[in-house]
Amino acid sequence: MESSRSPRTGRRHSLLRTAAVTLSLATTAALAGCASADTTTRSSSGQSAFKPAAQKEGSRITVWADSTRLPSVQAYQKSHPDVKMKIVTYDGGADGSTYLQSKVQLFDRTGSGWPDVVFGTPTDVTWASEATKPDARPFAAPLDEKLVPQSTLDEFAKGSLTPCEFDGHTYCMRNDIAQVLLWYNKSLMDKWGYKVPTTWEDYEALGKKVAKDHPGYLVGSVGDTNSHESYFWSGQCPAFSLVKPDTLRTDLRDPKCTRMAKLLDDLIGAKAIATQGFFSQGFAENSGGKVLMAYGPSWYGQYLFKAGFKTPAKQIAAAPPLAWKGESTTATGNVGGGVWMVSSHSANLKASTDLVTWLTTSDENQAGAPTYPAYTQAAKAWLANPANRNYFANDVSEPFEQAANEVWTGWSNTRFSDSTAWSSVVLPALTSGKSLTETLPAWQREIAGEAKSQGYKVVDQ
């Protein structure tokens, strides 16, 4: 799934190696799918030079999937026996792997070998939607070019297909999302008479009260490799904002960045927010039972509290994303979510597209998926599945659905992972006792350096 590396495929954090965590590194990385960011700026040209390869309907299609999605592909094959398929298991882009890109570059040189369908991360789409040379076609086929009906694409959660969109076309279908919301221990909140916060200001005030009244209990953590996606992405901090396809704005001096940094610094200082990651070694055993609240992705319920912390059923509840007082709109972040792409080289686009559509939109597949589907109707089936709701102390449907449509699209999907700079610069600074506020300039410099190395122009305003 998605990650701090938790359930996601993309940059990964270290998982608990104690008995407290049962998820393997592969499972956690796979469950999420998303690599760095979740969105990208698209141009409005709307022009497509897509020319399908010679089609041979009924020909065998080759499908590359990660181990988490393998059962779904096998289920499709079983229910569609007339479709000839070769299924290959690979890493799916987990841990920032460039295996898929390297293989596609090889196939581009040799002129054959491309898989027809692949599961990957939004970061994969950044290169898969671009031709490697003028006379070549991009690896990914534009699905809106008479392959997938627009009516189907319109039924995905608001903004969830943004990572798939380049130059006015849609190059992938989103498998799952990991919208950020507020998790809390309802049993303890009720026992102590605390009201669930709805604003960031109330969250901060309650965190300070918890630190005073119940020392040792926590309302969050900033120590995982995806913590910035939960807080700074939700806070609409322009750390990764593509203003043009080749121009990245990273401005951590923006008030929306500095106010979040200050809020977190104050809670860290009060010892209400940990600088040790939820998924760091020993956390579950030593502090898992003292997490009163956690601001994080939709998979936290099953994969952090249930599997990692072993919190008993009917204690953990979910609430909608937090808003800032005085602001009319609520925005949230995203920590994971993979994509399916169809190869532009496929000789059987019909079968390939049918498979990808079934994998992402069918209730048959998605109702039992490990993480929250991006397709709206499939998400309803997922929420109706007792396995996805019986553990919780409240009905998570409303907060999940609300958050799914409030993910801020200003945090862009880029050619590089958004977790690298956070992990290499910010987390060590926090460990050494520095504040987030004083570390913002160094974080910005590291992001800018990575962006330039990937060919982006960088602006800070």
Image (spheres, rainbow, N blue to C red):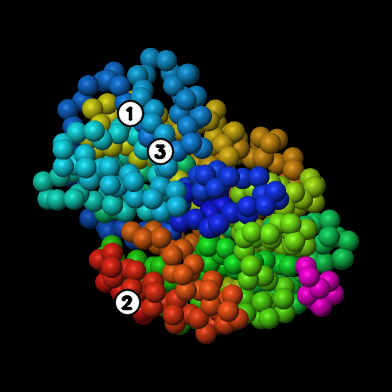
Residue 152 higher or lower than 283, as above or below = above
**Callout 3, which amino acid?**
Tyr
User: Does the magenta segment cover residue 344?
Assistant: no
| Residue at 68% over, 77% down | 267
Label 2: element kind: strand
Image x and y of residue 346, in percent: 25, 31
Residue at numbered disc 2: 459
Q: Can residue 50 be seen in this view?
A: no
Instruction: Work out which quarter of the rendered image holds the C terminus and state it.
Output: bottom left
Residues packed near mark 3 inside 10 Å, few (<14), some (14 to 19) or many (20 plus): some
The image quarter containing residue 356 is top left
Alpha carbon of mark 2 to alpha carbon of mark 1: how far?
41 Å
Foreground disc of the pair 3, 2 = 3
Residue at numbered disc 3: 90
**Callout 2, which amino acid?**
Val
Image x and y of residue 191, in percent: 88, 61
Identify the magenta region.
Answer: 209-217
| Residue at 33% over, 28% down | 62
- Circles 2 and 1, Cβ within 8 Å, touching? The answer is no
Residue at numbered disc 1: 62
Using the image, tell me which numbered label, if any, was put on residue 169: none
